[in-house]
Amino acid sequence: MSLPVGVTDRIEHMRSLDRVVVPLAKLIRRRLPLGSPVRDLLHGVPTGHPLHPPLATVSLGCFTATAVLDVIDVDPRASEAVLATGIAAAIPAAAAGLTDWSVLHLEQQRVGLVHVLVNMAALGLYSGSLLLRLAGRHQAARALAFAGLGAAGIGGNLGGHLAYRMAAGPSHAEQTTHLVPLGWHDLCRLWDLPDGRPVTRRLGYIHLFVLRHGTDVKVLADRCSHLAGPLHQGRLILEDDEACVVCPWHGSTFRLEDGGVVHGPATAPQPSFEVNVRGDGIVQVRPRQVI
């Protein structure tokens, strides 16, 4: 079920939602502090991909299958089992989705809040349908399930708007292989870089995070893969004896050595660059090849 673009655009600018959005997001961030193992798990850091979409797909698939089973009028136990599976999968999907939602931009959070409310309504309808099935009231249960499918369709449309129109989820660190040709590229002079303080330098179309310690230089793509925050304005920390940078916007943490994600909300690594310092002091970079 698709919503008109004008509807979703209006939701993005509904400031009245902020009375719920702002305190709820703060509460989630306080309960699940940045860098905690549970938060990283719910973001999907261990797998390198957001956790919410595949879990939500399981639920929506089960709900759709329930509608098909209801139409063909199979053994009620089959539809009950599929529906119960969808409801069970919706709980971790909601937990992962709310965790991701808590560190989005405000406009994204407004749409996300409506997405959550609609999906809660769908889950309520499906839960009621399951209870009616267990009580033997199959006709009413099917009616609730079809109403739930309509609500889930609207919720899924809002989720798609968040992902594809508002880019809440895909990596914002543009892949560099097609923007920077292979081979070494002159970036700057070594001694023009401040020692111990990250700066940004431009290489063609790409802004780079550059950090020099003596003659050692680390280079990453500067725009955070989560929501494109400027990494050169972030904090430098040691995490398990590895030098890292923390995004100033939402706290994603990346290793300086290879751009790997240490803590979410980011799940995609930062593109990193190999560095060569020529004898005349010119810093050269090239995209690091993933083997």
Image (cartoon, grey):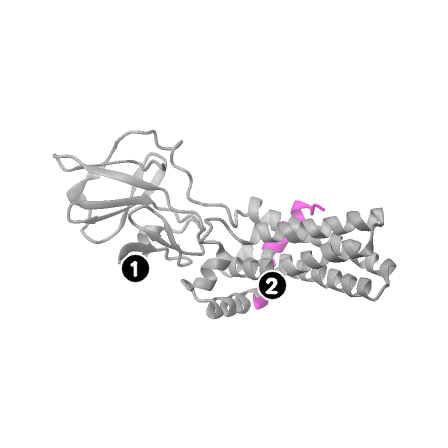
- Tell whether label 2 touches label 1 (CB within 8 Å): no
Judged left or right of residue 251, residue 154 is right
Residue 204's place in the image compared with 168, above or below, is above
Picture quarter containing residue 91?
Answer: bottom right
Residue 286's place in the image compared with 18, above or below, is above
Q: Which residues are magenta?
A: 1-20
Q: Where, quadrant-wise, is the C terminus in this rendering?
A: top left
Where is mark 2, residue-wise? 17
Judged left or right of residue 41, residue 114 is right
Q: Determine the residue located farthest toward the left in the rendered image.
A: 279
Instruction: State the SS at label 2.
Output: helix
Q: Position of residue 57 (x, y in %)?
A: 63, 49
Q: Position of residue 112 (x, y in %)?
A: 59, 57
Where is mark 1, residue-wise? 240
Secondary structure of the magenta portion, mostly? helix
Q: Residue at x 81, y 64 (%)?
A: 132
Residue 202's place in the image compared with 198, above or below, is above
Q: Residue at x 73, y 49 (%)?
A: 64
Q: Amino acid at mark 2?
A: Leu
Q: Residues within 10 Å of mark 2 (few under 14, many from 20)?
A: some
In this view, the residue in front, 260 or 291, is 291
Judged left or right of residue 5, residue 25 is left
